[in-house]
Image (spheres, rainbow, N blue to C red):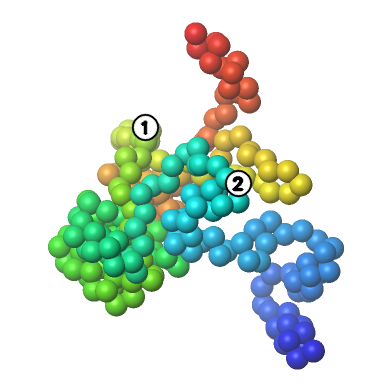
């Protein structure tokens, strides 16, 4: 009863969102995209376990491999990360928007020393990944056309069936030479063109 009262009280004093939404959601009368609880997947540590999840729940191997990921609280992984900071991308597990990140190939000795101290102080909060060679596309920046790095974020809708939506969000690093595509770090977006929803017909046309 106390928990329900606290929940009701917090709903009354909220200054943003839709008052009473959580109560209606609890009753099953409304569906919420990115519903409460899905944020657990934002913990970047989860990423390292995705291949094992696929194997455990589906008894399948991933079709697309993960980027090699190192968990800094594991002593062997931490040793490798600290010895290769100039080659790796280090991310804070619970940060978002490109914050708390070190791009080793573009870092200074001072920045690497700073992250060495952070990792040793709180290894659970850090992962590291191999630096990927992101695709580049022509982009107008500072009045010139240059090749900027991009990534594609697809959208997968989960309901009675799982549906992978064609296309997705193409993010672009607008700072020349940058690998960080997050909008909070100066990134932007580009149009994503879906030429066909029938890949087999496209391959036949290409022949």
Q: Nearer the viewer, residue 203 or 20?
A: 203
Q: SS class of the residue under badge 2?
A: helix
- 38 in relation to 122, above or below: above
Residue pictured at 29% horizontal, 67% vertical: 75
Residue pictured at 23% horizontal, 64% vertical: 79
Location of residue 29 (image quadrant): bottom right
Quickly name the residue at label 2: 58
Query: CA–CA distance between discs 1 and 2?
Result: 40 Å
Q: SS class of the residue under badge 1?
A: strand
Of the numbered discs 1 and 2, the one sitting upstream in the chain is: 2
Q: Residue furthest left?
A: 109
Residue 73 drawn at (x, y percent): 34, 69
Report whether residue 172 is seen: yes
- 165 in relation to 27, above or below: above
**Number of residues whose C-alpha sits closer than 10 Å to that of mark 1, classed few (under 14), some (14–19) or many (20 or more):** few
Quickly name the residue at label 1: 138
Contact between labelled residues 2 and 1, with CB atoms less than 8 Å apart: no
Q: Say whether residue 106 is left or right of residue 63.
A: left
């Amino acid at each position: 009863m106390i928990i329900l009262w606290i929940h009701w009280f917090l709903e009354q004093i909220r200054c943003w969102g839709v008052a009473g939404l959580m109560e209606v959601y609890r009753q099953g009368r409304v569906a919420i995209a990115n519903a409460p609880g899905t944020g657990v997947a934002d913990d970047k540590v989860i990423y390292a376990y995705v291949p094992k999840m696929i194997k455990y729940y589906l008894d399948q191997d991933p079709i697309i491999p993960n980027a090699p990921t190192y968990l800094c609280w594991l002593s062997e992984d931490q040793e490798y990360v600290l010895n290769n900071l100039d080659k790796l991308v280090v991310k804070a597990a619970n940060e978002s928007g490109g914050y708390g990140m070190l791009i080793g190939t573009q870092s200074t000795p001072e920045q690497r020393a700073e992250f060495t101290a952070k990792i040793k102080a709180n290894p659970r909060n850090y992962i590291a990944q191999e630096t990927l060679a992101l695709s580049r596309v022509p982009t107008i920046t500072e009045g010139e056309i240059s090749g900027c790095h991009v990534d594609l974020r697809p959208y997968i809708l989960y309901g009675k069936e799982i549906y992978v939506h064609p296309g997705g969000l193409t993010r672009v690093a607008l700072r020349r030479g940058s690998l960080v595509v997050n909008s909070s770090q100066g990134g932007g977006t580009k149009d994503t063109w879906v030429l066909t929803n029938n890949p087999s017909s496209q391959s036949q046309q290409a022949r």
